[in-house]
Image: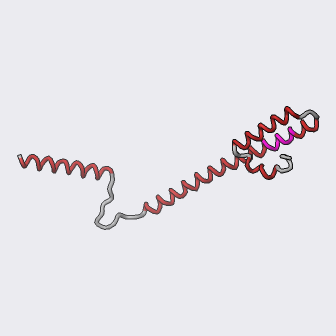
Amino acid sequence: SLNDHYKLYSASLFDEDVYKSFTTIVSKAKKASKSPESKQFVADWEARLEEAGQIGAENEAADAKALQAKRRAARRKQKQKTKGKQPAVGKKRSTRSSRAAAALEDAENMENSLLSVQ
């Protein structure tokens, strides 16, 4: 029965689709159960499913947070590595303001060239 093999599927109950499938089975079992013993069995089984589903969902959330923290740590480490590096000799770091200044200088040179030709 499903209760006998609980350990085989309990680890998968964090998955919403799997959990929904089992809740569908539980609701059908509730409707079909006639005796008080079978009703109690279904109620106990439903409680176990809910508990395993909640624990699994909490573990999934913790795993996601851990992965996110790991990625942030890797980015911080990468920033620290590149932060201390100096540009190569004779080369200038390109920044937005230096590129804008260079573009303005090129435009002025071109304007001066055109004015001198006329």
Does residue 104 appear to the left or right of 23 in the view shown?
Answer: left
Q: Is residue 43 magenta?
A: yes
**Number of callouts:** 0
Does residue 30 appear to the left or right of 37 in the view shown?
Answer: left
Is 47 or 30 nearer to us in this picture? 30
68 lies above or below 40: below
From the top left corner, tell me how far across and down residue 65 is, in percent.
62, 50
- Prevalent SS, magenta region: helix
Q: How is the image coloured?
A: secondary structure
Tell me what residue is drawn at x 60 percent, y 53 percent: 67
Farthest residue toward the bottom?
89
Farthest residue toward the left?
118
Does residue 68 appear to the left or right of 116 in the view shown?
Answer: right
Tell me what residue is drawn at x 84 percent, y 42 percent: 45
Tell me what residue is drawn at x 9 percent, y 46 percent: 115
Tell me what residue is drawn at x 43 percent, y 61 percent: 82
Q: Is residue 53 magenta?
A: no
From the top left corner, tell me how far across and down residue 43 is, in percent.
86, 38
From the top left corner, tell me how far across and down residue 103 is, in percent.
24, 49
From the top left corner, tell me how far across and down residue 89 is, in percent.
31, 67
Highlighted range, magenta: 42-49
Is 96 or 118 nearer to us in this picture? 118
Image quarter of residue 92: bottom left
